[in-house]
Amino acid sequence: MKFVDMKCSNCGGRMEYADGHYKCAYCGAIMLKIVDAKVDADVERLDAEEFGRKLEESKRSFLIKVEDEIKVLDAKTAIINKRLQNAKKSLSVGKYEAVFTDLEGVSDEIPAAVRLRFLASMKVKDEYGLSLCKKDIRNDWYRKFLFVCEDEETKRSYEKIAEICLLNEKLDKELESELQVIREMMKVGLREEPLTYAKQVCSKYPQLCKSWGEYAAVKCNQDPDYDCTIDIEIMKKCPDYKWDFVPDPVKRRRADIISKQEKSRRETEERMRREALEKEELDKLLRKDLEQYKVSRKKFKGYSLFLDFLLVLVFAGGLMSAYACRAGIDKVGYLLALGMLLVIGGAIMSCFCVGPVAECKKECKTSLSRLEPHYNYGNTVCAEFKNLKKVSLFVSLLCVILALAGIVLLVYGLTIV
């Protein structure tokens, strides 16, 4: 149970709500909220939430005050109280025959015992369920309870519930005749008339589950793709809702909808699973490409630096050769020889390095072409490689210029010897 912001009219205590009624946690008084009138509802624009609100507005409150146990305690009353508790438990779980067994030996002069026997005879768990009966509830146990009950307000509530049950019986008979007309219309092949008549029936008996069930059945009959979910939600808001009251066409349509939703859910899960597997495989390939790119980039940087170093050696050799020629070969001839060795050796080795540099660059581009479409992998490394190429190109051009300058110096030195 859960506490609600409602005060007991008997003792002022807080009320607890469960199973369609409110019960005082202190004195045990029961407050019923029962639909006591036809609900004025617009069938065309009604949803389950709005329908539930309209039903709530139309409910009237009835107070039931019956002590659950005898207050004076002795050995005999302790046994009676235990029997009352057992009977109450049996009633709450729908074991109606067991209630009479549990109350064997308990006097009919105890209001709580008579109330439990009366509810069990009607096969209901409480007064809220009693108010939904569609027959005359004024049997012998009903009369006995009114006779032994000392609370006048409780008596009036029971009398009002008896009137509501008679009204329920009358409305149910009227509704059944109306529904029969709708079924006859559909049987002879009419299409628009059954729907119009079903709307009128829902407007006339909106608090009765069967009226909404027949309306949904007509819609399902007219439209093979009609979704009756909203209609079922409205039916569940009705006080007398039972799944047995839902027409078979609506049950089948609901089963089809659930089946389609389940199929769609399974297909979605399967698609997501396949996409996850594909993504996992793609990630493995991309990680492999990323590792390959890193290796190729490392080689590219290494070969590029070595090539630049060789070009600088060519420049240094040319500078040494020019200096040796200027100073005199007889004095620093070894410098001329060393300079020429550096120029010739550096130039030859540079030619051999150009191929590996181009090959590593090609490998990097190949890996990046697969990585680039994928943001998580290609976005950063592509930008990084572009910057690396720019820097490498600038340094390489500078080193080539120096190498050419070294060769020019070598030629100049040889011409002045």
Image (spheres, grey):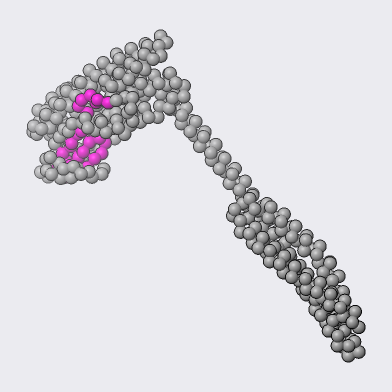
Where in the figure is residue 199, as x and y percent of width and height? 32, 20
- Residue drawn at x 48%, y 33% is 261
The relative height of residue 206 versus residue 90 in the rendered view (above or below) is above
Looking at this view, name the residue that lies furthest to the front. 416
Q: Quadrant of the C terminus?
A: bottom right
Write down the region rendered in magenta: 16-41
Determine if residue 105 is in view.
no
Determine if residue 300 is in view.
yes
Magenta stretch encompasses residue 372? no
- Residue drawn at x 17%, y 24% is 162
- Residue drawn at x 87%, y 84% is 325
For this rendering, which residue is in front, 51 or 328?
328
For this rendering, which residue is in front, 110 or 56?
56
Where in the figure is residue 269, as x and y percent of width and height? 53, 40
173 to the left or right of 12: right
Where in the figure is residue 173, as x and y percent of width and height? 26, 16
